[in-house]
Amino acid sequence: MLLTAADAPGGDSTLFGVDETPGIVSVLATYAGQARVWRRVNDGSTQAENDAFNPWLLVPDLALLGDLPVERLVPSDRFPTLPHGRQAGYRELDGDGHYKYLVLARNFAFLERAILRSQGRDRLWDLRDHVYYRPPVEQYLVQTGRAFYKGMLWEDVRRMQFDLETTSLNPLDGEIFMISMRDSSGWERVLDANEHGGEAGLIGEFVRLVGERDPDVLEGHNVFDFDMPYLVARSIAKEVHLGMGRDDDAPVESRDALKVGARNQSFRRHSVAGREIIDTLHAVKRRDAIVHDIRSYGLKSAARYFGLASAEREYVEGPEIHRTWLMDPERVRRYALDDVREVDALSGLLMASSYALASMVPKTYERIATAGTGQGLIEPMLVRAYLWAGRSIPRAGAAIAEEKYIGGYTRMYLSGILSNVVKADVASLYPSIMLAYEIAPRTDSLRVFPGMLQKLTHLRLEHKQLGRAQLAGSAERVYHDAMQGAMKILINSFYGSMGASFALFGDIAAATQVTQRGQEILQQMMRELRAKGMRLIEADTDGVYFTVPEGWTFEDELRLVAEVGRELPEGITIEHDGRYARMYSYQEKNYILQGYDGKIKMVGAAFKSSRNEPYGEQFFNEALPKLLALDFAGVRESFEQRVYAIRSKQVPVEDLAVTVFLSKSEEAYRASGKKEEQYEVLLAANARWKPGDRVRYYHAAHGRHGYKKLYEPGATDYDAEYYVKKLRETYAARLCRAVAPEDLNSLFGEMRGMFDRDPSEIKPVVVEVNPPE
C-alpha cells in the first residue's frame, strides 16, 4: 500500500465507519449471517477471510414479530451483537424516531418468517412502511463499521478490462472468436479462438487469466447487457465452468436499477464473488444526465466525446468485424486492444469518485456506481451513524409538510449579443446555507446531517490543498482529487436528500427554507451589482451573468466580486466564475459564451442536446463564431452552404438522424393510449426494444409529407426539403434574438426581398426581456 494513515485526512467514524481495516476490495454476505471478505495486503496479494454477523432489521413495534422469542440486549457504545446461544434479540433505540427497535438474528429468514406469519403477508416489501432492512452486504458493513478501499490509492485497486468479439449479436446462433484483456498495470492480451482450439478453449483461457491476474474489479462497456450474458450463455453451451470469482464461482444474475438523473433504468446485473463488476456504459449515461449532450453512449463515440480516442485508433464497423478477422486478423486484434484501452481510460476518468465514495458509504463499489446520491449514498451513512449511536430512525415522510416546494430562482433580463460579460456565483450555495443557518431535517435528532456536512466541507478543502501539492498525474494527486470529488458529490447530495419525500430524513419544509434563503441571497447579490452600475443578463439558482464597463481588467472584476461578497450574510462566499468577451442570450438557461481566447461554449438544450440532429449543431459550430464576431454576412454564408449541402445530398444521413431515449416498454406504450413518434417508428419497423434503449431515425422522402424511418447507414432517401425547413425554422430561428425582426429574412430567408438590408449592414440588438426587481 502506498497510502498511510498520515496521508489521508479524516478518519471520522461518521463519515468512514469505525473499523479501520485496510485493503477491503470485495465482500460477499448472506442473510444467513455469513460474510467472506477479500483484502489486498501490502505485498500486493489477496487474502480471503470468513466472518460472521447478525442480520438485522428495524421495526416500530415488537408486536410485528408475533410469537418470536426475542430477548433484550444490553446497551453498549457499539453496534449490538447476539450473545452466544441466542437466536434473536433486540435493542430499544433512544429517541422518538419511528423505528424504535433494532432486531437481530442468527439468520434473517428467522425474522422474516416470523413477521410474515404474524402479519399474514407473503413478502416483506408489502410491509415497507413498518419494516426497514438492507441487503446483506450493506447490513454487514453497517454492523462492522467497515468500508472498501481504506488505505488504498486508486492505482492500488487492480482493475481488468475485457471485451468480446463475436460472430453474431445473439449467443444462440453466434460464438465468441476473440477476447481482448487489459489490466491497470498495463498488461494486455488478445485471445483468439484459433490459438486455443476453438471457443471452449478460448473461454477456458480467459477464466484462467482472470484467476492468474487476480483483478479486484472487472470492467467493460455494455458489459451487463452484452459481454456477461454472452459469456454465460456460451460457457453453458460449451460446458465450460465460468469460474470468474475468486473462489472459482460462476457469475450470479439479479435484477437491479441504474439511477440516471431522476430516472431508474432496470438492468440485469451479473456478480462474481470476490470481484466488483463495473459497466462504463452506465458511467457515460450518468454523466450525460448532467451534461445532456452526449449523442451516443457507444464506446467509440464516448471515447471521442471525452477526448480519449487515440489518433492511431483502429476502427472496424460492427457487422464487418468477423469478416475482417477471417481476412486480416491482426487488424481486428488491434481494434480489440483499442477497445479495452478506451474502457480503461473511461474508467479512469469517470469512476475514481465512486471508488473514493466506497471508502465512506456502506455499500459495495459496484452498487455505488449505479446508486442515486440521496437514498443511495447519504441515507446509508445516516443509518449507520444512528444505529451506532443507539438512536431510533424516522420513517420516510415523517417530516413532510403541506406547503408547496419552492425551487431555485431563475430569471432572464436581457436577450441579444452582449460584451464584457462576467459570471459570479455563490460557492456551494445550498450546503453553505444549510451550515450558515443551521438548517437540517427536523427528524435529525442527533444533528448528524449538519455535522457530516461540516466535516465533508472541511475535509474536501484539505484534500484539494493536498492534491495541489502533489505532481500532476501522480498516484497521490489522483487519490486526493478522487476524494475531494467524492466529497463534493456527497456535499451536493445533502440538499436533495432532505428534499426527497421518500427519504428517511426527508423534510420538504426544511428544503423549502433553504431555497427561500437562496433566492434572498441571489437577489441581494443582484441588487448590489446593479447599485454598482452593472447590467444583469440572467440569474439561475446560485449565480448571475452581468456586463461590466468596457476596459475593465480581470483584477477589476475580482475587486467587484469581493466588494459584493462582503455585503452577503456570514458564511456565504461569492466567487468569480468566468469572464467572456461576448455572450448571446437566447432564453433562460440557453446561451452562447465566447471567451477572450475565442473559444465558444454552448449552454442549454436549444444549442447542445442529444435530441438535436447533428447537422443542426454543425450549423451552430459554423455560424456562432461569426455571429459573436458580428459577421452577419458570414452567418448568411454558413446558412446558404448548409442548405446547398442538404439539397445536393452531401450531408450524410447520420447527421440528419435524431436519437431519442426510450423510457417505456412496448406494453407500457401501447397501454398509454398516446402517440409518440419514436415508438411509432419502432412499431412500424416491427422492431423490439426495452426501456433504457435509444432509437435513431430520420425523415425519409415519400409522397408529399414523407415519413419517419429507422436509421440505415448510408441511406440517401432523406427528405431534403424537410431538413432545409427545419434548419431555417428550428436551428437558425434560435439565433433570432441577435438581430431585429426585420433583419431575419436577410439572414435566413429563402430569397432576399427588395427592401431587405444587406447582411453586412445588420446591427446586433439587445432587448430587455424582464426588468430587474
Image: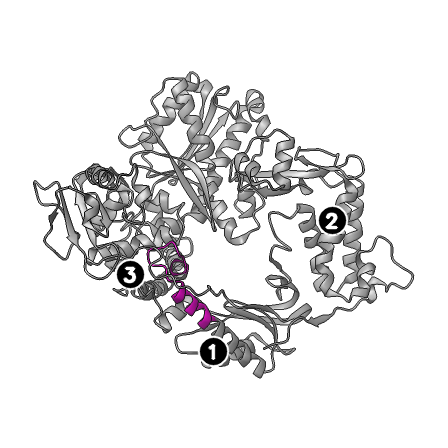
* CA distance for labels 2 and 3: 55 Å
Most distant residue in the right direction: 754
Q: Amino acid at mark 3?
A: Pro
Q: Earlier in the sequence, mark 1 or mark 2?
A: 1
Looking at the image, residue 494 lies above or below residue 138: below
Q: Earlier in the sequence, mark 2 or mark 3?
A: 3
In the image, which disc is placed on residue 333?
Answer: none
Image position, residue 513 (x, y; %): 42, 69
Q: Is residue 464 visible?
A: yes
- Within the image, what quadrant is residue 120 found in? top left
Question: Which residue position is annotated with label 1?
Answer: 565
Q: Amino acid at mark 1?
A: Gly
Q: Which residues are magenta?
A: 496-518
Q: Horizontal placement of 214 versus 198: left or right?
A: left
Q: Horizontal placement of 120 versus 588: left or right?
A: left
Asked whether 560 or 724 is in front, the reply is: 724
- Within the image, what quadrant is residue 5 found in? bottom left
> Residue drawn at (62%, 47%), measured in percent from left and top?
611
Image position, residue 746 (x, y; %): 83, 60
Q: Amino acid at mark 2?
A: Lys
In the image, which disc is placed on residue 9?
Answer: 3
Give the number of marks: 3
Image position, residue 66 (x, y; %): 18, 43
Most distant residue in the top direction: 197
**Dot 1: few (<14), some (14–19), or many (≥20) neighbours within 10 Å?**
many
Image position, residue 192 (x, y; %): 46, 23
Q: Earlier in the sequence, mark 3 or mark 1?
A: 3
Q: Is residue 475 visible?
A: no
Q: How is the image coloured?
A: one colour
Question: Which residue position is annotated with label 2?
Answer: 726
Disc number lying in front (1 or 2): 2
